[in-house]
Amino acid sequence: MEGLCLPAEQNLLQTHNKDSDQALFVDTSFPVDSVLTEEGTIVWKRPKEICDNPQFIVDGATRMDICQGSLSNCWFVSAVASLALHQEFMEQVVPPNQSFGEGYNGCFHFKFWQYGTWIELAVDDRLPTVKMEVRDLSGTITVSYKLLFIRSKENNEFWSSLLEKAYAKLKGGYGALQLGYPSEAMEDMTGGVADGCQLNVSPAELWRSLSRLLEKGALVCCGNTVGELEQKNEQGILGKHAYSVTGMSQVQTKDGPVQLLRIRNPWGHTEWTGPWSDGAPEWDNLEANEKKRMNVVSMEDGEFWMSVEDFQKNFQMMDVCHLSPKSLPGAEAAVQPWECAMYEGRWVRGMSSGGSIEQKELYWLNPQFTLNLLEQDHNPGDPGQACSFIIALTQKHQRLRKAAGMCIGIHIFKGDQDRVFLNQRDLCKATPILSTDGYRNRQEVVIYSCLPRGRYIIVPSCEHAINEGEFLLRVFTEKGNFSRPVDRSSMYVNMSIDPSVVPTSLPSLDSCRAVFLQFAGVDEMISAVELHQLLKKLMEELGSLQDSEGFDLESCRSLVSLMDNAGFGKLGWEEFQSLWSKICCGTLIFCQLDLTRSGSINSHELVPALQSAGLKVDEFMVQLLALRYCTSDRTVTYSSFICCLLKLDTMTRKFQESVCTSSGSVTLNYQQWLHITMYN
């Protein structure tokens, strides 16, 4: 029986080329998932075992090379077909100088854009096939192997099958490619932002929109969604077929100006036959120099001109992929490329995941970014006085985690020139001036719009405050405009400390001295066990704080190591005085926030609490502290807060006491590093 998935373990390390003694590459890291076993008996075969003369690419990589297989991944197939319209972009993803000839070792390379950077993936050329047996009239059985997934119309061409395998590896297996949106794959293969555009606008508005898009170097694809598949209408436009918009120009005729769009059919034949088509009488109304400028050539090359009005009559959909100068080399050729800023962030429950805008009490927890629009668009033909921008919110690693995905959205609020954030009170009252169309279960949601000059606040969020995940926010603006992440610590006002909120007064140092000596040994020092007993005694009157879990033995070991400067594993009276002083300070801060006397505070209250103690940390560090000190319900108990406060205070002090370089860094030898990290 043929193997279901991968060959037996002993065959994973190498297979041999029948034509030489060279070992062929085997990708043992390729993820094998249930979709392969669901298809029945699968045989993994290399192209040289499928046909006699395999080729990587035959006569260029085109959309006609792609035939969908048994996977429900038409979203990926259509994206590859669109990319194939642009050779320079296709070669970025599918390096063409690969073959089954000289130097062949069974390994093929592809490149994909992932969250801000291009990565290269290598896969072996073993492809999932099914065994086919045909018996002729004489009873002879002929055995062949049929590719299970994407294949080329040319039986000996394999670039599309191998590209699909590499993309499956990127996403976590062939099963991860079941169902999706073309925009996701388009972005993975260009680094751009994919979006749909409305065609049911006035011709003048469509002209202005396309002018801005092509000026920015965007890839623009259009399609006719009516009629029979690949069948021509009366004027030569194919039904359910993808075209690309490659240019635009306004010409002066005897009857006045006419706005024309240049369209390309990837097939290279079957052109538009209506007005302004190749050889149409409309061209006779142009001067010779105007014809030359338009590069009018009467040949069946797949490229043709048509008016904006005819474009709207014959095409019902238009998809756009906005490119930044860094996404692809070709994007740099744009007349006015976008400025692009990228920010990585996380939604963490109880910290930075505030849920939807309807959840007023928590929405303010979501990350915020400022959008500063200072320079208006330079579009002489556009009467509007505004600043264009694109905001794209992407949830990361959705398919790799095999998660169902979250519903995500973007809201934009009018900002304040005096502040760079909106606090809880502001957001409860504010109404967004722009937003995505609700919350959508998409890998990416996009806002492409324009606003008057000013400061705005971007709030990316997921629908439910319990959702957690990583995201990438990309902001495309005109030169001179910019965006910034909001420092969460700036959202909090320093608390005023009111000693009366503490349930009962804390013991003074004088009264602590007597209790300390009661538990100390003959050396007048206390160990972690003795500190545990001592703190329990001192805090007997602290009400709700004492009712919580208190300082357990492990917490006391941590406190001793933090305050033990001599390395004895014990604390003397002076060290205990310092510890008690910090505990008193931390208790006052904690009680300002624990207004319900529950013995715990919410995780998002760590920031104002630490700020009140004079400790400033960035958002990522706060998230790490929450992972370390929070309970499962995202709260911080009294004892955990005191341990967190003392740990951060001690590590900050030790850094400040070290010899600092001009760049703000310190140098530690191995022993110093171990001492700080292992005994603190």
Image (cartoon, rainbow, N blue to C red):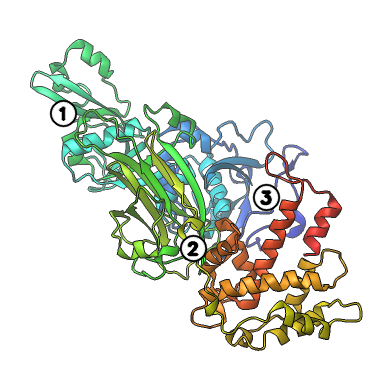
Which of marks 1 and 3 precedes in the sequence? 3
Which is more N-terminal, label 2 or label 3? 3
Residue type indicated by callout 3: Asp
Residue at left offset 76%, top offset 83%: 534
Crowd rating for badge 2 (residues with CA inside 10 Å; few <14, some 14–19, many 20+): many
Residue furthest out toward the left: 255
Q: Amino acid at mark 1?
A: Pro
Q: Is residue 461 left or right of residue 164?
A: left
Near mark 3 (Cα within 10 A), the count class, few <14, some 14-19 or many ≥20, is some
Give the residue at mark 1: 275
Q: Amino acid at mark 2?
A: Ser
Residue 299 occupies quadrant: top left
Q: CA distance from mark 2 to mark 1?
A: 57 Å
What secondary structure is marked by label 2? Answer: loop
Given this view, does label 3 or label 2 mark the residue nearer the observer? 2
Few, some or many C-alpha atoms within 10 Å of disc 1 (few <14, some 14-19, many ≥20)? some
State if disc 2 and disc 3 touch (CB < 8 Å): no
Q: Which residue in the structure is indicated by mark 2?
A: 352
Q: Which residue is mark 3?
A: 27
In percent of width and height, residue 374 lies at 34, 37
Rendering quarter of residue 464: bottom left
| Of the pair 328 and 143, the residue shown nearer to us | 328
User: Circle 3 — which element?
Assistant: loop
In the image: residue 321, left or right of residue 648: left
Where 199 falls versus 176 (above or below)? above
Going from the N terminus, do you reach mark 2 or mark 1 first?
1
Q: What residue appears at the point 22 percent right and 34 percent down from the top-left corner?
A: 207
Residue 131 in sight from this viewpoint: no
Residue 590 screen position, x and y as percent: 57, 74
Give 648 or 223, whichever is nearer the viewer. 648
Residue found at x 36% / y 65%: 425
Front residue (pair 451, 640): 640
